[in-house]
Amino acid sequence: MTKPSANPLQPAVDRRQTELTRARYNRIAPIYNLMELLPERRFSGWRQLLWAKVPAGRILEVGVGTGKNFPYHPAGVEVVGIDLSERMLAQARRKAEKLGHPVDLHQMDVQQLDFPDRSFDAAAATFVFCSVPDPVLGLRELSRVVKPGGKILLLEHVRIDHPLIGPLMDWFNPLAIRITGANINRRTVENVRRAGLIIESVTPLGPLNVVRLIEARPAG
């Protein structure tokens, strides 16, 4: 595989924060599925909704975690999955084997993807960019590796723009990061725009529209 050339205009990856994120997810990997047992009852339907929109071709799944999306991958697609945490990936590999589902899995950082430009027909991520240290940098990488006209599909929980709830989310965010590794106050729709992606649609989901299904594409 030909590695992408370095872009001198691209911000550098914050190695310290990235390593802290990896360590958090390695720590909670053994209990991750248990932690999300109740919310997954709702999330599973949203995951299915996202993957129903994924086109045929070669697909990059970012942040595969323990493999929660594997049952919803469309038939006939070639999925390449990445995750920052090796312990999460170990569980994903076991799940793929159990399902008899071929997924090409790699330990990799979305902020610095080891794929050439325009390598994929689409990219998908579910509840991932709440934990990427520099989400705009990661989204720019998706724009780079997805072909022009390809889809970038994101399922993300976001900060609620309410005069009371929003500040409360900001106040609780440091605790949420320590416990789960995820920010609860990310403005992901705005981050998608900041990354230069073209937003095609945003579908609010869940109580108070705290979750958004974002459909975007590279600007090129």
Image: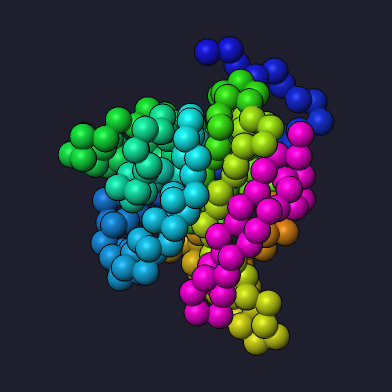
The outermost residue toward the bottom is 164
Q: Is residue 127 magenta?
A: no
The outermost residue toward the top is 2
On screen, residue 85 above or below 112: below
Where residue 15 sits, quadrant-wise, is top right
Say left or right for 53 vs 7: left
The magenta span reads 193-220
Image location of residue 27, percent across then percent down? 35, 50
| Residue at image location 55% in from the left, 37% down from the top | 122
Is residue 168 visible to the viewer in this orientation of the structure? yes
Where residue 170 sits, quadrant-wise, is bottom right
Q: Report the colour scheme.
A: rainbow
Image location of residue 7, percent across then percent down? 76, 25
How many numbered marks have been drawn onto this rendered protein structure? 0
Image location of residue 67, percent across then percent down? 33, 45
Say left or right for 76 vs 176: left
| Residue at image location 28% in from the left, 65% down from the top | 37
Q: Quadrant of the C terminus?
A: top right
Q: Is residue 209 magenta?
A: yes
Where residue 110 sits, quadrant-wise, is top right
Is residue 137 visible to the viewer in this orientation of the structure? no
On screen, residue 56 above or below 31: above
> Which is nearer the eye, 38 or 50?
50
On screen, residue 164 above or below 146: below
The outermost residue toward the right is 9
| Residue at image location 26% in from the left, 61% down from the top | 34
| Residue at image location 63% in from the left, 62% down from the top | 202
Image location of residue 23, percent across then percent down? 43, 45
